[in-house]
Structures are given as C-alpha cells and as structure tokens.
Amino acid sequence: MAILRLPALGRQIVDVDEIYEYLKERGIYYDRWEADAEFARTADSEAVLQAYRSEVSALISQGFSQVDVMSVNELTPDLDALDDQFAREHTHEDFEIRFFVEGEGVFFLNPGEGESLIELRCVAGDLISLPRGLKHWFEMGDVRHFRCIRFFSHDKGWIPHYTGSDLNLKYRKQSSE
C-alpha cells in the first residue's frame, strides 16, 4: 500500500482512504486497482494490459489514446541517466498517469505556495494521476525496479518541462542529514 509523507509537518498517512482524500483536495487522483486475471512476473506488455483490461478501458474512454507498459530494473540500459531524468523537478502539459504493476517508486509533489511537499511512495496496485502543470519529480529508490502502465492523451509520450529548481537536491540533502 502507498505511504504518503509530509516531511515538513512530520506527518505520515498510511490509510488508503485518507491518502485518497488528502490528494483529492489538491487535485491529485489516487486509486488502487486489482487485476482482472493473474499473469506471470515475466508476462509481456500485452498480458499485463489484458490483466487490467476493465480499468485500462475506462481510462482510454476518458481520452487517453496512448497506453504502454514501462519496465525498469537493474538491467535497463542507461539506468542512471533515466533515473536522473525522472529525479529533476519538472512539469508536463499532459496528465501524468501511472499504475504500478510491480515494484515501487516515490513521487515528490510540489503543490506550490502554502502547501507542504508531498512524498508519495507507490507500490504494486497503486494508481496516481498528476494534473497538468504540477511540479514534481520521481525517484526509483534503492530497489530501482518497477513496472507500470502509462497513459497519454497524445502520441508524443513522456515529455518533461524541467523547472530548473534544485528542490530535489535540497530535499535529498536534508533527508540524508
């Protein structure tokens, strides 16, 4: 299950309903999905999409025309460069929707003035939808392994607009002290 942390407030939320409500108040959608069918860990992308057919179809009907499955692990070429791309604060012109099929990762959400930085650890079964323009970054963590279903409303895929902020570096330094 997901864990939501508010480091500046010293608060942690683990209850799914509380996480849902906290994020919803900030325009961020969170949900939990269960597979329609079982599939092997070695299953290809098509089998993964089939296992979540009803949920995937529901999002496609809302205008998300591009869907893919992204797998990242220790064998992924240029893993450090990929990690660096994700771990710099950025925004998108499109929603960023990720459903974690396996593994885990942490989204750092920067809602802006007057709001605390949100740290959301997602694990298998978690769906997160970030609205257009939300400042955020993503870290793979120590495990550096996840597989997720990604949704796009265009055929360009994942396009970050980096903010130039070093908040992610400051946050890493503060959390390691």
Image: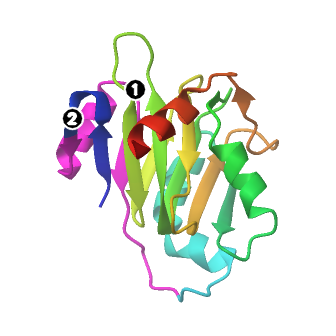
Q: In the rendered view of the protein, which quadrant contains the N terminus? A: bottom left
Identify which residue is drawn at 67% across, 63% down: 70
Mark 2 belongs to which amino acid? Gly
The answer to if 64 sits in the magenta stretch is no
* Residue found 61% across the figure and 31% down from its top: 89
- Mark nearest the camera among 1 and 2 is 2
Up the image or down, 124 lies above or below 93; here it is below
Give the structural element (helix, strand or loop) at label 1: loop
- Where residue 118 appears, as percent x and y from the top left, is 37, 34
| Dot 1 or dot 2, earlier in sequence | 2
The relative height of residue 105 versus residue 76 in the rendered view (above or below) is above
| Residue 65 visible to an observer of this rendering | no
Q: Which residues are magenta?
A: 12-39
Residue in front for this viewpoint, 25 or 13 = 13
Q: Residue furthest front?
A: 177
Q: Looking at the picture, how far across and down is residue 153, in whole percent?
A: 69, 39
Q: In the rendered structure, which amino acid carries the disc numbered 1?
A: Gly
Q: Which residue has dot 1 on it?
A: 27
Q: Which residue is mark 2?
A: 10
| Mark seen at residue 19 | none
Residue 107: where, in percent of width, then height? Answer: 48, 44
Picture quarter with the C terminus:
top left
Asked whether 15 falls inside the magenta stretch, the response is yes
Q: Quadrant of residue 144?
A: bottom right
- Inspect this view and state whether residue 91 appears: yes
Using residue 174 as the reference point, say whether residue 60 is left or right of it.
right
Q: Quadrant of residue 97?
A: top right
Q: Mark 1 and mark 2: span between their CA atoms?
A: 22 Å
> Which corner quadrant of the image does residue 86 belong to?
top right
